[in-house]
Amino acid sequence: MSEDDTPDGPAAQKLPLFVERQTYRRRRIIDAARALPVLGLLLWWVPLLWALPKEPTSASGALIYIFCVWVGLILGAALLILALRRRDAEAQTSNGGQP
Amino acid sequence: MIGLNALAAISIAYVLMLFVVAFIAERAARRGKTAWLSAPIIYTLSLSIYCTAWTFYGAVGSAARSGFEYLTIYLGPSLVLIGWWWVLRKLVRIGRSQRITSIADLISSRYGKSNLLGVGVTLLAVIGTTPYIALQLQSVTLSVEVFSDTQPSLNPEAPPTAFWVAVGLAIFTVIFGTRNLDANERHHGVVMAIAVEAIVKLAALLAVGAFVVWGISGGVGPMLERIDASALGEWQINEGRWAGLMLLSAAAFLCLPRMFQVMVVENDNDAQLRTAAWAFPLYMLLMSLFIIPIAVVGLDMMPPGSNPDLFVLTVPLAFGQDGLAVLSFLGGFSSATSMVIVAAIALSTMVSNHIVMPLWLRFRTDGASVSGDVRNVVLLSRRLSIAGVLALGYLYYKFSGGGEALSVIGLVSFTGVAQVLPALLGGIFWRGATRNGALTGLTVGFAVWIYTLYLPSFGPDTVLPATFFDNGPLGIGWLRPEALFGIEGMDPLMHAVFWSLSLNTVTFFGASLMSFPSPLERLQGAQFVNIGRAASRTRSWSGGAAQSEDLMVMAQRILGAPEAQALFLRETRKQGLTGILPDPTPEFLEVLERELSGSVGAATAHAMIGQIVGGLSVSVQDLMAVADETAQIMETSARLEAQSEELTRTARQLREANEKLTRLSVQKDAFLSQISHELRTPMTSIRAFSEILGDAEGIEAEDRIRYASIIHDEAVRLTRLLDDLLDLSVLENGQVSLNLRRAQLSELLDRAVASALQGEDRLRVRRDQASEAFWLHTDIDRLAQVCINLIANADKYCDAARPVLEIRVGQSEGRTVVDFIDNGSGVAAEQQDVIFEKFARVSEGEAGGAGLGLAICRQIMTRLGGDISYLPGQGGGAFRVVLPSDQALAAQ
């Protein structure tokens, strides 16, 4: 399995500018996996705004919102991990068993 | 109603079941059946020790008191796991490759194996965790009291429940937590027991929740209406606490010693983490799903003034659901016990590796190389540490009075351990983080936490006098514990979190920037930050002075004799030696140190090897020497490579030249024999016929004329041969004088064809007269000689049934060329480069010249300023004559 894809320092210059489609796709999946918690944090900070309007938000609605975000994040993480694993498995078989 | 005795029996049966589970798991691990023990789902369930009794009971209490804030405690860790690619993935990889045994070990190992840092983190962890353990004991006691309230006959003199729980937990932890000094510090039995407990507590909470929603409220819809109608019906949060607690719990999730233990130390492979990344957030979602319903129903149904922390127990009891209440009790019991067990293991590892072992090493004057099993010392120190940690927890519980609301202690503890976060994240992402920076940051954060949160948490007038809070120490107003720098009005918890973590981070960063790390720190820093990228195989030992035998003695004492011998044997084989003692190379010392650090921690292992090797650890000079050497070696090797390439090239040229010389020498030999033969044959016949003419009388005139003509012919042949030789020699020496005149090419070729074929019609010559119609200004006779030679050669050597010679005039590279192409088999490739040499003869047997013709042609063409060469690939023998350029142009 390849390592970090955000290299810095001198190693960056040695990395190829163009990579195969497969590798490119894999990196974008990893980008998505990295972005997911940030998205989660933003969505879960939305309730901070609910205190502003004069008409208070109902507790049941708030609970449903928070739990829906939760389920969405879990599904997102699971799907990304699944996609990553499938891609790695494909890469393994196409490389003749070499990881 | 369940009696206390029945409850005790159920609890003991449950604990026995856990013992059996742990025992079976340990046995399976011993037999090597670790596949199912390290299954990702077991790992995920073991993470559930995050959900302690504080969350099991306290979440409902928190919801009843302050609404939705309890959710943040789960949301933060969910984000950490969903963002596993950022931190957790790196952390578990470092943990595995560096054989990390605890969070103190990680910090100490990262910052140059500094034991001072290890001690600091250990102290912080002990101080932060003790109240937490007290909290678990308190929750078990409270839950037992729920049952005993209905039976006032309880003997008040009996030892408190908390005491027996602490003793029982200590026994369990000692048995399964310190069975062996496993090299990887993995405790299969404990992990399996925790996984079972995770299922029990989830099932308990879901069962109570389901009972509340469907049993009492009558379904999801009515439940939601009930929530909206209750005191919690409006969304009300303290914005600062909502955001801050989410981040705090995320930080604590990473830094809590017990979480680090199950998440990093017990981690076996990346697949475990990949499953946990989505499965554990799901677990936490389920754990928090029914908290609000239980709280709402509890507030509705229970008499005012009842403790909301215990709604999970009291609501089922109030509705006569004894079975459910017992299940709920077991859930709370599970939450408490699993947390205490893992926390005790984690803390005992830290205390033993960072405090007891270094002290023991220091006060044993005989050093690390004496014989005798150190493992017993390590195990004993861990067992005592476990007992000590639990005793501390119990004492804290006893003296704090156990009256506080549960969740407050939990958050105080969270803030304490979160002080490790800057050093932790800085350590794995920033190579510039230094030991001094980490030490400063930790100290400042720790001090601020103690001052602003930990001491005030005991309440005014217990540790700190009330005037302290109002006026500050010695009346200095801006130092008030809950309003540092005069900033008032913040929530006390957020105030402490904000100041402790921000001052911690700022000083950590600042001190890192200003200090200079030791070489070992820089090595470790590079290894931690670049984990998994190009594995940097830099050695931290320069090796040499160590005695392998001493190392062996020491390794046996820590790893055990068979394991140590196996390790040494493996390393000996790797070095290609026989026997059992490998050479103490830096590589070997590195391997050994890593193995040892799996048992006693990085700092201790480093110190122990240092004692034997004699402190020959790496120095800046060594590093620089290594770097210099490498650069030099690279330069030299590049130079050598260039030289070797050049040598190869020269050798190839020499070989080619040699081959050519050999061929020429062979040709010369052949020529000499040929020329002697050529000279001798005419001489012999001349001599023979002149003798006949001289001796014999009766020769007829006819015969005499014939003989005389033979003599003449042979003499002519001899002369021609000698002429050729002379001609060549003259041409080669450049003594030839050119006789320049004008003539047409067609004329020249006409003459050459006539002269070469002498009227014979064996060879057919095909020409294109039109293309030949141009004037030449050169030595026409010499050029004709070349053409005659080529045509005669074709006549002589063309082996086709109907030989045809084609003479083609054309242009090549701006010059006029005349190609002579026949339809024979041509000249073999290996002959092509020698046919123009003197004495070259293509075929041995055939009669003809002495192999001087083409050599003369080349000399002539060179003199005339043209060229002649063999033209391969024309389907037969082919020669190209490049006409002299200036003369040709002049003739246009």
Image: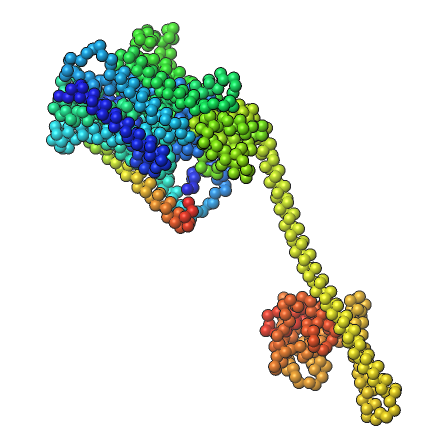
Image quarter of the N terminus of chain B: top left
Q: Position of residue B798 (x, y in %)?
A: 64, 78
Query: Eyeballing the image, is B241 above or below B694?
Result: above
Res. B685 in view: yes
Q: Position of residue B19 (x, y in %)?
A: 28, 27
Name the residue rendered at 78%, 69% in the picture.
B731
Here the colouring is rainbow
Image quadrant of residue B32? top left
Q: Residue at x 45, y 31 (%)?
A: B562
The residue lying at 52 percent from left, 23 percent from top is B369
Q: Nearer the viewer, residue B292 or B709?
A: B709
Nearer to the camera, A19 or A2: A2
* Residue B532 position within the rendered picture, expressed as x and y whole percent measured from the top left: 44, 37
Is any part of residue B808 visible from this angle? no
- The answer to whether B105 appears left or right of B750 in the picture is left
- Quadrant containing the C terminus of chain B is bottom right
Where does residue B295 sit, x and y in percent of width and height?
18, 24
B200 or B653, which lies in front?
Answer: B200
- Count of marks, rendered view: 0
In this rendering, position of residue B98 left or right of residue B653: left
The quarter holding residue B375 reads: top left
Q: Residue at x 59, y 70 (%)?
A: B873
On screen, residue A76 above or below B114:
below
